[in-house]
Amino acid sequence: MKLQRNGRSKALAIGAMALVSSLSLAACGSDNNNTTSASGGSSGSSSSAAINCGKPGALIAAGSTAQGNAIDLWKTTFGAACSGTTVNYGGVGSGAGIQQFTQGKVQFAGSDSALKPAEVDATKAVCTGGQGIDLPMVGGLISLVYNIEGVDNLVLDGPTAAKIFDSQITKWNDPAIAALNPGAKLPDADIQSFHRSDDSGTTDNLTHYFAKASSGAWSYPASKTWAGKGGQSANGSAGVSAQVKQVKNSIGYVELSYAQTNSLKSAAINTGASKPVAATTENAANTFAKAKIAGTGSDLALSLDYATKDEGSYPLVLVTYEIVCDKGNKADTLDTLKAFLTYTASDSGQKAIGEKGYVPLPKELTDKVNAVIPTLA
């Protein structure tokens, strides 16, 4: 699936996200608290902005694989602009990232689901005088990617998708799938489903969707840990993508950028709106525009409407949070951490990942993130 820039521009125009398209370039500074011009983005386009580098340092982080492509872009741009600064990110999955954070091994963790109360309590051991908070940074959508020869426009709904991933529906020509896809040449073939082997925020968001939109077909609680019956497992979004690409008659779930990178087809979702909703950044932006803050204080955890029936609103969305201490961050890397997060939440940083299949967050939300970052201590 190729990202349509004209569609994205329309979404920006109607206010789903107001991004700054041109920014002033600042001259390179010579001291540790310098401001440097940098550019990043896909080939044929660039986004430029003044990056406040802060003090040189090395950041170590880990977590969500869904945001891996975004972090790769950001750390390359930030590192090129800020001499002496490096960002090392391990895509180990949201659950492992949170664990490394609570063990004090990383300066921040990426998670596709907000911290649970028990996890917040665990962070207090490393956030001296404070606790871990959720800063939404990467907007995305979960694609139900498939590899079925001769089927180009698969449509699924919540109950049918849940039954597929729970092995309640095992054939592609099952009547429930056929009813959603009149005229499609569905094969009389076994469904090969793939899920995450690691604790994953992508799994957490998918199962939240099943819990809200499957009409009871998904009988398990929403969780980072896979609970469905049958299927095969793969590690990380990259692993699931690779398996679906290689295995005929397969289906899996990955963040949109992985679907695009691997040239995988994504199912449209029948939400109850007048027509099925395609897995596009524009349609995900419509859902993000209506997200509400569920966290308190400096915690900016979001409440997402997985059961939306609004026209053009794709329900299977996720947001990756950068988890940091509100107080008690390591003094020697705090300045570098603030500088990097300020860049990622900037108009320039969000626009850059929008060109890589992610969904730039609404400016109303990034303004809140940018108000919290300077308060980190």
Image (spheres, helix red, strand yellow):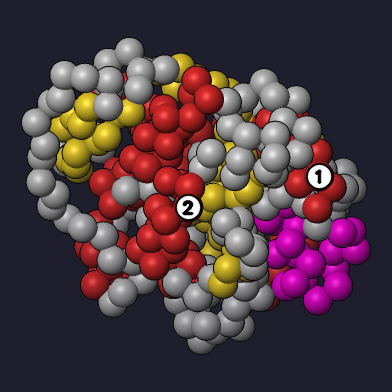
Residue under the point 80% across and 53% down: 117
Residue 256 higher or lower than 14, as above or below? above
Question: Is residue 4 found inside the magenta-colored segment of the image?
Answer: no
Q: Quadrant of residue 244?
A: top right
Which residue is identified by label 1?
121
Q: Residue reaching furthest front?
A: 129
Q: Residue 215 carries which label?
A: none
Q: What is the three-letter code of the residue carrying label 2?
A: Val
Residue 375 higher or lower than 293, as above or below? above
Which type of secondary structure does the marked residue at label 1 adopt?
helix
Structural crowding at the residue carrying mark 2, measured as other residues with C-alpha within 10 Å and reported as few (<14), some (14–19) or many (≥20): some
Tell me, yes or no, if residue 253 can be seen here.
no
Q: What is the three-letter code of the residue carrying label 1?
A: Asp
Identify which residue, 77 or 45, lies in the foreground.
77
Q: Is residue 357 left or right of residue 125?
A: left
Residue under the point 87% across and 44% down: 230
Identify which residue, 88 or 159, lies in the foreground.
88
Spatial CA distance of label 2 from label 1 is: 20 Å
The number of callouts visible is 2
Which residue is identified by label 2?
372
Question: Percent position (x, y) of residue 145?
Answer: 57, 48
Question: Percent position (x, y) of residue 264?
Answer: 49, 43
Identify which residue, 350 or 59, lies in the foreground.
59
Which type of secondary structure does the marked residue at label 2 adopt?
helix
Q: Is residue 370 left or right of residue 147?
A: left
Question: Percent position (x, y) of residue 320?
Answer: 56, 48
Region of the chain picked out in magenta, as a range? 202-221
Residue 251 higher or lower than 365, as above or below? above
